[in-house]
Amino acid sequence: MFIQIIQGRCSRPDDLRAQLDKWRTDCEPGAEGFLGGTYGMTDDNMFVGVVRFESRELAMANSNRPEQSAWWAETAPLFDASPEFHDCDNVMLMMDGGSDQAGFVQVIRGKVDEPERLKAMLEETTSMLHEARPEIIGATIAIEEDGTFTETVAFTDEESARRGEQLEMPEALRGWQSSVHDLTYLDLHHPWFATHRTDAG
């Protein structure tokens, strides 16, 4: 899987949401390899989009389509400044990667010193995490070549997520924290989702 993260400040969130809806109508039908996306705005007007493709090659092929270029030409001016793009081939899914039923999504960005060790620890503790924090219904972790990572965590609802934050976690679930640093948290209180539509769907 390939994940692209788009992040930028936007003072016109309703217009941006309309443009993303337009993408589904005008561009998605020809976007080969598109799997879905998770989107939202923080309280201080930071837009975050986490878009999933089957592979980097298919994502780049989509970026080069005329329809995509025309859509982006209309969308880019809605941002207050040029947004950041982060491309990640090194992707891990936890609990099937998330759920479009999530009522709250938290995007965590930071740096990891040993990416493969982190992934191994998370794989070993996923079932334990699900048992300790049932309000977490899935997550993706996308790691860039320099160790920058973006974790997108789907929760049933924000109230349950905040209660879960207060719990004392088993030591096995705290081990991964020593390998990450420079963390920032982006709370998407009203996330929306795009899952690839098929003819059967």
Image (cartoon, grey):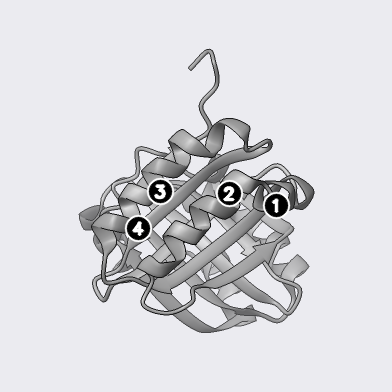
Q: Which residue is mark 3?
A: 20
Q: Amino acid at mark 4?
A: Gly
74 or 124, which is in the foreground? Answer: 74
Q: Which mark is residue 40?
A: 4
Specify which label sits upstream in the sequence, 3 or 4: 3
Specify which label sits upstream in the sequence, 4 or 1: 4
Residue 78: horizontal and vertical position, in percent? 36, 66
Q: Residues within 10 Å of mark 1 (few under 14, many from 20)?
A: few
Residue 20 as seen in the image, left or right of residue 129: left
Q: Residue at x 48, y 37 (%)?
A: 26
- Res. 147 visible in picture: yes
The residue sitting at the left extreme is 159
58 or 136, which is in the foreground? Answer: 58
Specify which label sits upstream in the sequence, 4 or 2: 4
Q: CA distance from mark 3 to mark 1?
A: 18 Å
Q: Residues within 10 Å of mark 2 (few under 14, many from 20)?
A: some
Q: Amino acid at mark 1?
A: Asn
Residue 114: horizontal and vertical position, in percent? 74, 76
Q: CA distance from mark 1 to mark 2?
A: 7 Å
Q: Which mark is residue 64?
A: 1
- Res. 189 visible in picture: no
